[in-house]
Amino acid sequence: MPDFKLFDDTYTKQCTVRDLLCHRIGLQTFQGDFLNWGSNLTRKEIIQHLALSKPVYPFRYKYGYCNAAFITAGELIKNVTDTIWDDFIKYHFFEPLQMKHTNTTYQMISNDANACIPHTLVNGKLVTMPFTNIDNMGPSASINSCVRDMANWLLFQLDSGRFDGKQIVPFTVLSETRKSNMISSDVNSRIFKSNHFSTYGLGWQSYDYESRRIWEHSGGANGFVTKTEFIPEENLGVLVYTNTDMNSLYDALVKQVIESYLHVPYRNLSEMYFIPTQKSRLAEQKELDSLTRLTQSKNKPLIDLQNYVGIYNNSFYGNVEVKLTKEKLTLHFSHHPNNIGSLAYLDNNTFLCTYSDVTCGVQVLPFVVEKNIVKGITIKVNDFIDYMSYDFIKVK
């Protein structure tokens, strides 16, 4: 792939497909998805932007989940087979596994009368939301499926790469995806005391529990979170798919089924997950309510609103523009034209930004002001998309 380039030339020369698939190219989890997720970039442009994404960690030093790395691996399929990723998995996986209700495009899920409607929480209330077009994220995030089809995928995993009596993938290849390549996260010893390790293979997370080795992966998109787990030695596969992105039941229910199957004494895992999450969520809502009240206190900006208007640039993202209409500032994104941020003044050149794309959330955005001259702005979206904040310099 001649166009592939990482921020550091040494990393570029050393990078292998394995490095891409086990998330060890130096970026932190979700780094860059502020630009990539739901944007108007092509897959090729997302890959090209990897060269502008400064790594947080040394190469092969620490696990950092990178969607752009999986997009790169998917595009490599076209270089090797002359078949695009979408068609390759359709012909080599969906069709032989009889996954008849599975596809990879925004258009197909949008036109599916039986598709789930995505939901999220806004100010403590569950609301519906439109599907997000993530075709450009293809190999990392865009498979639309259902429980029946995914059950066939799990049967294939549990039967050493066979389905309906046919060998779909050699077991040696399947085994390669399950080998541990990186320590991926801390064990959840608070709830699962017999859990000792958590590692990442090639698209599979692996951990131990009750003397069994389990492979799993979660998935998330705007309005959806999912979990798929399987235990080959027990011939057990469990999947839970939910159509709201604000719940922990998707994980708790999988674990509840596994514990029941392994004859672990019953405990209410839903409650054990829910109570701390709810406590955190209520605290966040309380803080947001406080900030909203502050915007209504009629604090006046230190400088005229017109001074904030202009074009701001970040070397990774590109341009955003702040506009003033009827004494209201709005934030506009060059690569997310359908997402507009409404800015309400807090204090000290800081604004509360409410995004029209509710998945991006409500964030506090500070402007950099020196001697009453606006120099820049720091932009953040929900951690669900990207944990990082991005500094933009005013250029016009």
Image: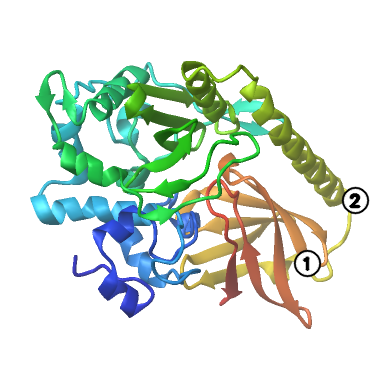
| Front residue of 236 and 390 | 236
| Front residue of 95 and 349 | 95
Percent across and percent down for residue 258 are 48, 22
Percent across and percent down for residue 359 are 57, 41
Identified at 30% across, 26% down, the residue is: 154
Count all numbered tags in the image, as a single digit. 2
Residue 288 against residue 49 in the figure, above or below = above
In terms of secondary structure, where does tag 2 sit? loop
- The label on residue 59 is none
In the image, farthest residue toward the bottom: 371
| Residue type (three-letter) at the residue carrying disc 1 | Asn
Instruction: Choose top left, top right, bottom left or bottom right for residue 205.
Output: top left
Residue 350 against residue 111 in the figure, above or below = below
| Residue type (three-letter) at the residue carrying disc 2 | Ser
Identified at 63% across, 45% down, the residue is: 361
Q: Does residue 91 appear to the left or right of 302 in the view shown?
A: left
Identified at 13% across, 37% down, the residue is: 170
Can residue 42 be seen by looking at this rendering? no
Residue 22 against residue 188 in the figure, above or below = below
Percent across and percent down for residue 315 are 47, 73
In the image, farthest residue toward the front: 211
Q: Does residue 329 appear to the left or right of 94 in the view shown?
A: right
Residue 253 against residue 4 in the figure, above or below = above
| Front residue of 278 and 166 | 166
Q: Pointer 1: residues within 10 angstroms few (<14), some, or many (20+)?
A: some
- The label on residue 297 is 2
Q: In whole angstroms, how far apart are the C-alphas of marks 1 and 2?
A: 15 Å
| Residue denoted by label 1 | 349
In terms of secondary structure, where does tag 1 sit? loop
Q: Does residue 198 appear to the left or right of 51 in the view shown?
A: right
